[in-house]
């Protein structure tokens, strides 16, 4: 009996796992050893100008309590801070500190390096095609000109 091909969801999950493991390794090497893969749920969804906890929870598809625990852990480590929302003083905006911005810049650089490595291994054109295909599936491709 033939083994079925892995479905796309499984393959995408495996790629995310590989990328997150390499990202974690690189962040650790760059001095951000206290960032855990679970913290990526916050970093992945926070806006550069700050985000409300409810928005982070919705984007991460987590409860407010769960995302709040991650935010508190990152706040205690010096990556985030809570500030009054200028549009609504009753609400706090969660923003990146200088250390948080540095870790984000390191992560973005790591992503570029990881993709460049994939390009060397698999061919730049294949990686570019993968990016374009995934953008199309996700509805993120630019509108035809």
Image: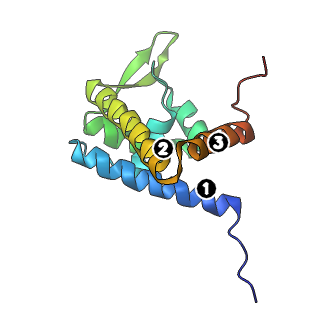
> Coloring scheme of the render?
rainbow
Could you say where residue 70 lies in the image, as x and y percent from the top left?
40, 44
Q: Is residue 80 visible?
A: no
| Residue 137 image offset from top left, x and y in percent | 74, 42
Q: Residue at x 25, y 48 (%)?
A: 28
Farthest residue, direction right: 144
Single out the mark in the foreground, 1 or 2: 1
Q: Is residue 135 above or below residue 26?
A: above
Secondary structure at badge 3 equals helix
Secondary structure, mark 1, is: helix
Q: Is residue 65 left or right of residue 37?
A: right
- Tag 1 near tag 3, CB within 8 Å: no
Q: Which mark is residue 12?
A: 1
- Mark 2 lies on residue: 41
Label 3 CA crowd tier, 10 Å (few <14, some 14–19, many 20+): few
Q: Secondary structure at mark 2?
A: helix
Q: Nearer the viewer, mark 1 or mark 3?
A: 3
For the C terminus, the image quarter is top right
Residue 116 placement, left or right of 101 = right
Residue 128 lies, in percent from the top left, at 59, 39
Q: How many marks?
A: 3
**How far apart are labels 1 and 3 at the CA level?**
15 Å
141 on left or right of 76: right
Q: Which residue corresponds to the image point at 25% horizontal and 33% vertical from the top-left?
A: 78
**Residue 116 seen by the camera:** yes
Question: What residue is pinned by disc 3?
Answer: 129
Q: Residues within 10 Å of mark 1 (few under 14, many from 20)?
A: few
Q: CA distance from mark 2 to mark 3?
A: 26 Å
For residue 112, side relative to residue 56 (left or right): left
Q: Earlier in the sequence, mark 2 or mark 3?
A: 2
Circle nearer the N terminus (1, 3) = 1
């Amino acid at each position: 009996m033939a083994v079925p091909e892995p479905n796309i969801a499984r393959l995408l999950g495996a790629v995310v796992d590989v990328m997150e493991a390499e990202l974690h390794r690189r962040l650790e090497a760059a001095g951000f050893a206290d960032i855990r893969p679970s913290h990526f749920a916050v970093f992945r969804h926070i806006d550069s100008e700050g985000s409300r906890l409810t928005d982070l929870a919705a984007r991460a598809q987590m409860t407010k309590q769960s995302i709040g625990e991650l935010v508190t852990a990152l706040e205690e480590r010096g990556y985030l801070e809570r500030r009054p929302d200028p549009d609504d003083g009753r609400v706090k905006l969660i923003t990146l500190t200088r250390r948080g911005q540095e870790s984000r810049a390191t992560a973005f650089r790591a992503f570029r390096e990881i993709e460049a490595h994939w390009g060397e291994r698999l061919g730049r054109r294949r990686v570019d095609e993968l990016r374009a295909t995934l953008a199309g599936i996700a509805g993120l491709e630019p509108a035809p000109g």
